[in-house]
Amino acid sequence: MSSSHTSDSPQATRALIEVSVAAGMSGVYSLATHLAAALDGTGPAVAPIPAGDSELINNLRLAVRPSDTGYPLESADIAVVCATSGSSGTPRAVLLSRDALLASATAFGHRFGTDARWVVSLPVHHIAGIMVLVRSWLHGNPFEVDPSVGGARPFDAPTFAATTAMAQRASSADGLLLMVSLVPTQIARLLEAGSVGIEALCSYDVVLSGAAATPQPMLETLRAHGVNVVVSYGMSETCGGCVFDGRPLDGVGITLGSQDDSEPGRIRITGPILASGYRLRPDLDALTFIDGRLETQDVGRLDSAGLLHVLGRLDDVVIVGGVNVALSAVESVIRHHHDVAHVAVIDVQDELWGSLPIACVVTKSARTDKQTLTDELKAQVSSRIGRAATPRLVVFLDQLPMLDSGKVDRITLRLQVARDIAAGHLEHPGVAH
C-alpha cells in the first residue's frame, strides 16, 4: 500500500463497533445518531451492518470484525467501515476516514448546494445511503425517510409520492432544496406508475441515479418530463458518487490507463475522497490503491469536453471462442430495445467455446412475442458487437433478482439459470454459431 494509506498510519486507538441497521425508519435514525458521534469524535468508528443473521450478513461481520480486540482498527482516523457484498465475490470492508467523508460531502455541496433536505430511499448500510446522512449532518439539514427503506416494505410510487409531498411541504416552508438518491430500478417503477410517480420525481431539485447503469432511454424520458436527473458514478472506495453527469467533483482526478487518456482504458481516480484501504486486506490494498490513486475495475473514455463515459467493467470481459466479449456491452445493446424493461447478461462455461453469453430479460409487456424479440436481440448484438457476443440463450423472467444496493444479484441469477439448464427447463447453450 502507498504511504497515503493505512500501513503508515499511527497506531489506532479508536474502537470500532457494529451498528445493526434495522429495516425502516428506526434503522436510519439509529445509524444517523451513531454516525454523528463517529464524525464529531465523541463516539467510536461505526460499521453499519443490516440486521439479521443470514449467511451474507455473517460474512459481512467476518470482513469487518467489529469490537474484536484481536483485530484493532487500522487507523484512528477511520470513522466508517463500509461493508460491501457486491454482485459477486467475497465481502470487503472499506475504511473511510472522517476527512474523506467530509471532503466528499463538501465537494458535493459546492456542486449542488448545501441547503438541502434529502429523502432517504436507499439502504443506509450502503455508501449511497451513508453519504446522504453525512451530507445532512455536515450541513445541519433535516431529512425525511421513505417507509420502504432497507426493504421494510416494497418500494412503490404512491408511498414514495406521499413521502415526497411531506418533504416538499417542509422545503416550501424553510426554503431548503429537495434531493433524493435512487437506483434505476426504483426510477423505472416510478415511471411505470404514470403521473403519480412522474409528478413525485418532478418535485425534486436533484434526482441522483446511481449504483447501476442508467439506461439512456430512461434518461431521455425523465428529461422529457422535466425531471432534473443527474447520473452518479462512484463506489464505496470513493465515498460514493464522485463523478456526476461525467464531471468529477472539485479535487477529484480521473485518468485512464491509456496513452494520453485518448483511448478507452481502466478508470483511475485520485483525490481526498479516496478510502484508506480495506479492513484486514493489505493484499487488496496493494492491488487497488497505488501511488495515491484508486485502480478501479471499470473501463471508461474521456470525450473532447473531458467528460467521463463509463463503458463497462474489466471483470465482465469473458472469452468466447478466443474473442474478448464485454458482457456489459451486450447488456447495453439489449437495454435499448423498446420492448426490454430490464436485462442482465451472464455467462456459462463451455468446454468448446470457453464462455457463452446468456441474456436474462424482463419485457415491458407480457404480450411480447418472445421468439420475435429473441431473434431481434440476437441480430442487434451480432451486427453491433459481433457474432461472438451474441447471446446463445435469451431467458425471459418476470423479474431479475436484485441486491438491496440496486444492483442485479448475479450470483443468484447464475444459480437460477444453471439449475434450469440442469433440470432441462432451458436448452444448454453450447451449440455452434
Image (tube, rainbow, N blue to C red):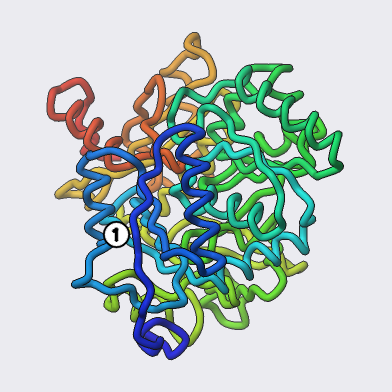
What's the residue at 57%, 36% (across, down)? 121
Q: Is residue 118 left or right of residue 419?
A: right
What's the residue at 78%, 33% (across, down)? 170
Q: Secondary structure at mark 1?
A: loop
Rendered position, 142 above or below 232: above
Q: Residue 306: x and y, percent?
A: 72, 69
Front in this rendered view, residue 351 or 309: 309
Q: In the picture, which quadrant includes the N terminus? A: bottom left
Disc 1 marks a residue whose amino acid type is Gly
Q: Residue 37: x and y, percent?
A: 51, 60
Rendered position, 132 above or below 147: below
What's the residue at 49%, 54% (across, down)? 127
Q: Residue 212: x and y, percent?
A: 51, 45
| Mark 1 nearby-residue class (10 Å; few <14, some 14–19, many ≥20) | few
Q: Is residue 213 left or right of residue 3?
A: right
Q: Which residue is mark 1?
A: 322
Q: Is residue 343 left or right of residue 118?
A: left
Front in this rendered view, residue 122 or 253: 122
Front in this rendered view, residue 2 or 311: 2
Q: Residue 387: x and y, percent?
A: 40, 45
- Classify residue 426 by image quadrant: top left
